[in-house]
Image (cartoon, rainbow, N blue to C red):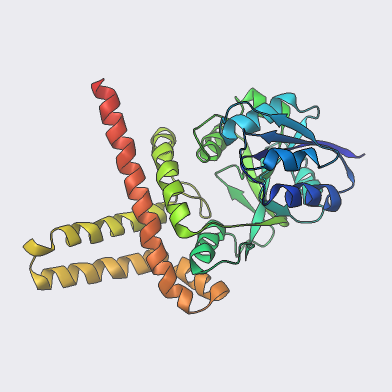
Amino acid sequence: MIDKVSVIVPVFNGKNTIKKCILNIQDKNKGILKEIIVINDNSSDGTTEILKKIKKIKIINLKKNKGVGYARHHGAKIAKYNMLCYVDSDLIISTNSIKKLIARLKKNKITGSVGAIQKTMNLTKRNWSSNFVCLKSCYGFDNVKKEIKFSVIHSEFCVIEKSYLLKIGGWKSYRNAGGEEFELGDRITKSKKEIILIKSASYTTYYTDIYTRFKKIIDRTEKYIGILIKKKYFDTTGSFATKNQSLSAICTSLYLIILIFTPFLNIKFMINSISLIFITQVVLEYNFLMYAKKYFGFKMLFYSFYGIQIINLGILIGACNFFINKLLFKNK
C-alpha cells in the first residue's frame, strides 16, 4: 500500500534555499503519494516569485508574518492527508527519508512523532563561526546506532499524524522562530507517547554565523524559560536546553561576576576562582569539545571554547529578559 503524506514546508525569506529544498523533496523521495504545501510566511526577499516557478506544489501566501509555529499549524489544518511531514525550507533531506520516517511511525501506537537526525555537515562552508553553530546544532547524535528517544519534537524534519496533532492542540504560535518544538514535545510526552529520531533518515542544512545565532539564542531562551518552569525538566542531549548547558551557562556567569568585581578582589582568590570555574566548564563541555575536534580539527577546540561563552551569554541575557519582563508584567 502506498503511503499518502502531506509535506508542509514553512518558509520566510528563503530565496537562497527554497527551490533546492522542494526539488530535492520531489526528486529523491519517491514511492509515496505526496502533496507539497508551502506556507509562505509573508516573505519579502523574492521567495514568492521563486515559488511561482516551481511546479506541482500548493502555495499559501500569508498576508502577515505569523511565525513558524503558526505556519506549521495552518499547514496541518489544510492538509488533505492524515500523515503530515514537516520540512524546513533550508534543508536537503536524504533519499527516501520521508518513507523511512513514516514506516517507523507506523511501527507501534506508542510513537507520537518520528524525526530525522542531522548530519554533521555545514552546507554554508563559511568559517569557524558557522562551523561552530553546526557543531552545537548537531551535537548529541554522533553515537546513535539506529534510533534514540527524544524529548523535543524534531520540527525541522519529522512526521506526525494530523488527527493526533490536532487532538493534543496542534502547534502553538510564538513570535519569530523557536520555542514551539519544546512546548509541543512536552505535550506529546504528557500524552504518553514517544518522540523517536532515526539514523536512517537524515538531512543537511546551512548554518549561520555565531553572532546571528547569539541573537536567536536570546530570543529562544526568553521563550523557553517559561516552558521549562512549566514542564519542570531539562531536555535530552542534542537539544537546546540540557542540564549540562545550564551549568555551563552558570560558569560563564561566574566569569562575568569576577570580571565586574576584579578591582575589589584579591588576586590569588581571583586566579584560583577562575581556574576552578575553567576546570569545571571543561569537564561539563568535554564531550562536546572532543566532538568539535573530531569533525573540524584541533584548532576548533579553542574556537569552540570561545563560542561556548558567546552562546552562554545569549542564554544569560535571554533568561534575564524573561525574569525582568515577568516582574514588569506582575507590577502592571
Residue 163 occupies which quadrant of the picture?
top right
The N terminus is located in which quarter? top right
Residue 128: horizontal and vertical position, in percent? 50, 69
Vertical arrangement, residue 33 with respect to residue 149, above or below: above
| Residue drawn at point x = 47 percent, y = 73 percent | 300
The residue positioned farthest toward the top in the image shown? 332
Residue 2 occupies which quadrant of the picture?
top right
Along the line of sight, which residue is nearer the eye, 111 or 201? 201
**Total marks drawn?**
0
Q: Is residue 190 left or right of residue 8?
A: left
Along the line of sight, which residue is nearer the eye, 113 or 67? 67
Residue 280: horizontal and vertical position, in percent? 31, 66
Vertical arrangement, residue 243 with respect to residue 54, above or below: below
| Residue drawn at point x = 70 percent, y = 24 percent | 77
Residue 306 appears in the rendering: yes
Residue 249: horizontal and vertical position, in percent? 34, 55
Q: In this view, does 158 lie to the left or right of 4?
A: left
Q: In this view, does 164 lie to the left or right of 98?
A: left
| Residue drawn at point x = 71 percent, y = 47 percent | 18
The C terminus is located in which quarter? top left
The residue positioned farthest toward the bottom in the image shown? 298
| Residue drawn at point x = 81 percent, y = 56 percent | 95
Residue 225: horizontal and vertical position, in percent? 39, 39
